[in-house]
Amino acid sequence: MLSRIFSPAYRLFTTSATSASPATMKLVESAISDNSVTIFSKTTCPFCSSTKSLFATKFPNVPAKVLELDEIEDGPAIQSYLAQKTGQRTVPNVFVNSEHIGGNDSTQAAFKSGKLSTMLKA
Ligand SMILES: N[C@@H](CCC(=O)N[C@@H](CS)C(=O)NCC(=O)O)C(=O)O
């Protein structure tokens, strides 16, 4: 009986703190689906610089969509949504052909293994 009262209230409290707004979700999902390469980044992050540099130098003909979360009003909400979606809270957070690659370490490893070249057919 008590759970019928407390459960919905508890769910409302716990999920409202972590749920992204539809606008945030749409922004993230559109960026990922509309671009071959999407990098969620911060201008102050050295790992992000390495990742951006990798794509710029190794795949110069593939346009990469970069969202600098520290320059966007919605940045913290986007980062929270990405954490929910991917389990990764840090930046850079990289997607290629809508597939989650991960952070800089994973992206560099994916380049070294040839995975990125295969995915981008470059
Ligand atoms: N090993 C990670 C390191 C990423 C990392 O530590 N990023 C920092 C920024 S340089 C971060 O996201 N810190 C938390 C934050 O900015 O919210 C990778 O390869 O991507």
Image (cartoon, rainbow, N blue to C red):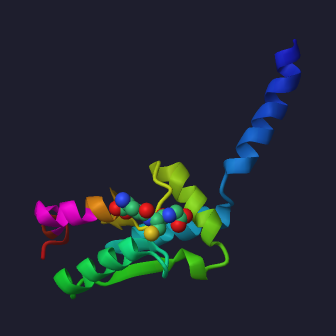
Image: 120 above or below 89 = below
Residue at 43%, 80% (x, y): give it: 66
For residue 59, which quarter of the picture? bottom left
Taking the spot 31% from the left edge, 76% from the top edge, the residue there is: 50
Question: What segment carries the magenta color?
Answer: 107-116
State yes or no: residue 109 in magenta: yes
What is the quadrant of residue 60 in the picture? bottom left
The residue at 84%/19% (across/down) is: 4
Q: Is residue 55 above or below residue 61?
A: above
Say which of 33 and 3 sits in front: 3
Q: Is residue 72 rendered to the left or right of residue 107?
A: right
Q: Nearer the viewer, residue 62 or 56?
A: 56
Q: Is residue 19 magenta?
A: no
Q: Nearer the viewer, residue 30 or 118?
A: 118
* Residue 27 percent location from the top left of the image: 56, 70
Residue 112 x %, y %:
13, 64
Q: Determine the quadrant in which ligand 1 lies.
A: bottom left
Residue at 80% across / 40% down in the picture?
13
Query: Where's residue 65, x and y in %?
Result: 40, 80
